[in-house]
Image (cartoon, helix red, strand yellow):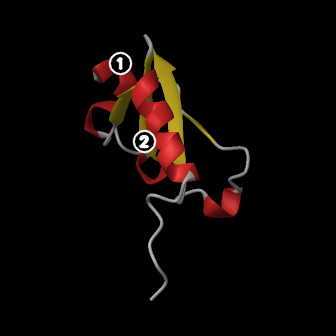
Amino acid sequence: MAALRAGDYVKSSFSSESRAGDCVMLCTVDGWIGMQDSKQYPTTPPAERTTLGFTKAEFAAFLTGVKAGEFDHPST
């Protein structure tokens, strides 16, 4: 997990500078995919960043769920 925390994260090219704190950032390290919140980057030291780690299969399943609307919340 330490290698994922300190990885070379990138944010989406669709993310504007005005939304700098509203982005999910991704990296790949040794076959794993790491996900971090841009609000913690780069001011939080790598060892303290909240980092989610996924295998490629897990990340593919997550993306399939996102595209299918599994994580959408109804408007209130």
Indicate left or right for 47 with 36 as reference: left
The residue at the far top in this view is: 30
Amino acid identity at mark 1: Ala
Secondary element at image label 2:
strand
Instruction: Tell me the quarter of the image containing the C terminus.
Output: bottom left
Q: Residues within 10 Å of mark 1 (few under 14, many from 20)?
A: some
In the displayed structure, 38 sits above or below 21; it is: above
Quadrant in the picture for the N terminus: top left
Residue 42 seen from this side: no
Give residue 45's position: percent from left, percent from top.
34, 36
Neighbour tally class for label 2: few under 14, some 14-19, many 20 plus, Cα within 10 Å: many
Point out which mark residue 3 bears: 1
Q: In the rendering, at what x and y percent does residue 49 appear? A: 32, 40
If you read the primary sequence from the N terminus, does the residue marked by circle 2 or circle 1 appear first? 1
Q: Position of residue 53 (x, y in %)?
A: 35, 30
Q: CA distance from mark 2 to mark 1?
A: 13 Å
Name the side, left or right, on which 46 lies relative to 22. left
Q: Nearer the viewer, residue 6 or 57?
A: 57
**What secondary structure is marked by label 1?**
helix
> Which residue type does callout 2 highlight?
Gln
Number of numbered tags placed on the structure image: 2
Q: Which mark is residue 11?
A: none
Q: Which residue is mark 2?
A: 36
Quarter holding residue 70: bottom left
Query: Residue at point 50% right, 21% down?
Result: 28
Residue 35 drawn above or below residue 22: above
Q: At 66% across and 44% down in the image, what residue appears?
A: 12
Q: Is residue 20 visible?
A: yes
Farthest front residue?
68
Looking at the image, residue 33 lies above or below residue 50: above
Residue depicted at x 26% and y 38%: 48
